[in-house]
Image (cartoon, grey):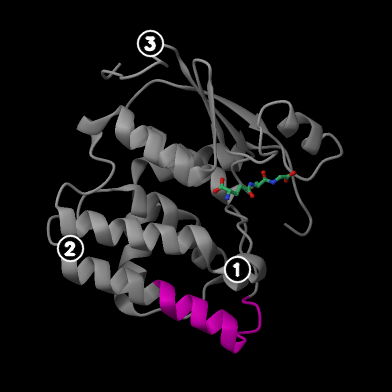
C-alpha cells in the first residue's frame, strides 16, 4: 500500500457506493480510488429500493453515496473524496503536475460537479443499456456541446502526452466518465474528437472493470 499521511494512518479504505449500472457519482469516486492503486473494500447499496435510504443513512452523514471510510473519517461527496485521495497519495498524481493544467483540470471538474443538470436528468446513467436519444431541447444540446468543448479545450491545450483530457488519466477524466457512459447509451451526434475520447475512457481498464461488474448486477431500475 502506498504511503499515507495524517490521522487516518494505516486504516483500511472502504468506499460505499450505489450500484454500478446506475450510480454516476459513485463511479467518479471509484475511478479516483482505483487510480491510487491502493487496496480498498467496497460496499454496494442498490439504489431505488424501499430500503435504500435507510441503508445509505446508516453509512453516510449526507445520506448520499459515495462515501469513503478511512479510519475514523467518513468523507462524503465525490469531489471531496477525490481531493482527499489526491492528498493521501501524491505519488499517484490524481491531478496533473503542471500548475496550469491542474488549474484547468480543477475548473472543468468543478463545472462537471456543479452543473449539467439537464444532461443528468435527460440522460440518466444506465451503463449497460442502449436507449433512444431524448428530444434534443436547446438546453440539452447546450450541455452536450459544452461537454465536447471542454474535452476539446483540455485535449488541445494539455493532452499532448496521452489520450486523456490532460494526457495521463486524472480526476477530470473520472468526473467525465459517467458522461462518456451516457453518450454511449443515448448516442447523441458528437464531433470526431469526442468520439475518440469516448473510446479512450471506455477502454480505460478501470472503466472496463466497473462496466464488467455493472453487467453482472442483478438489479434493474425501470426509469433510472
Ligand atoms: N454531490 C454528491 C451527489 C451524490 C448523489 O446524489 N448520490 C446519489 C446516488 S448516485 C444518492 O446517494 N442518492 C440517494 C438515494 O438514491 O437515496 C456527490 O458528488 O457525491
Q: Nearer the viewer, mark 3 or mark 2?
A: 3
Q: CA distance from mark 1 to mark 2?
A: 27 Å
Q: Of label 3 and label 2, which has the lower sequence position?
A: 3
Locate the C terminus and report the quarter of the image it occupies: bottom right
- Magenta part of the chain: 133-147
Residue 35 falls left or right of residue 11: left
46 versus 42 height, above or below: below
Q: Of label 1 and label 2, which has the lower sequence position?
A: 1
Q: CA distance from mark 3 to mark 2?
A: 35 Å
> CB under 8 Å between callouts 1 and 2?
no
Residue 14 x/y as whole percent: 52, 22
> CB under 8 Å between callouts 3 and 1?
no
Disc 1 marks which residue?
117
Q: Quadrant of residue 137?
A: bottom right
> CB under 8 Å between callouts 3 and 2?
no
Question: What numbered label is drawn on residue 10?
Answer: 3
19 or 7: which is nearer to us? 7
Residue 160 falls left or right of residue 216: left
133 or 35: which is nearer to us? 35
Tell me the SS state at disc 2. Answer: helix
Residue found at x 63% / y 31%: 44
Tell me the SS state at disc 3. Answer: loop
Disc 2 marks which residue?
158
Amino acid at each position: 500500500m502506498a504511503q499515507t499521511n495524517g490521522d487516518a494512518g494505516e486504516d483500511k479504505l472502504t468506499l460505499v457506493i450505489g450500484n454500478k449500472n446506475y450510480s454516476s457519482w459513485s463511479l467518479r469516486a471509484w475511478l479516483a480510488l482505483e487510480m491510487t492503486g491502493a487496496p480498498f473494500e467496497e460496499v454496494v447499496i442498490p439504489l431505488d429500493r424501499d430500503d435504500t435510504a435507510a441503508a445509505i443513512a446508516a453509512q453516510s452523514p449526507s445520506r448520499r453515496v459515495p462515501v469513503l471510510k478511512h479510519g475514523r473519517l467518513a468523507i462524503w461527496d465525490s469531489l471531496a473524496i477525490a481531493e482527499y485521495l489526491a492528498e493521501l497519495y501524491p505519488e499517484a498524481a490524481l491531478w496533473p503536475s503542471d500548475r496550469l493544467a491542474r488549474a484547468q483540470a480543477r475548473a472543468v471538474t468543478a463545472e462537471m460537479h456543479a452543473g449539467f443538470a439537464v444532461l443528468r436528468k435527460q440522460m440518466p446513467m444506465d451503463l449497460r443499456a442502449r436507449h433512444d436519444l431524448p428530444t434534443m431541447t436547446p438546453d440539452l444540446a447546450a450541455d452536450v456541446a459544452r461537454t465536447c468543448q471542454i474535452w476539446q479545450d483540455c485535449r488541445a491545450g494539455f493532452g499532448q502526452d496521452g489520450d486523456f483530457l490532460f494526457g495521463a488519466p486524472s480526476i477530470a477524466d473520472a468526473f467525465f466518465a459517467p458522461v462518456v457512459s451516457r453518450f454511449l447509451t443515448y448516442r447523441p451526434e458528437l464531433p470526431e474528437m469526442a468520439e475518440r475520447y469516448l473510446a479512450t475512457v471506455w477502454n480505460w481498464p478501470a472503466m472496463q472493470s466497473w462496466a464488467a461488474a455493472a453487467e453482472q448486477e442483478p438489479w434493474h431500475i425501470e426509469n433510472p
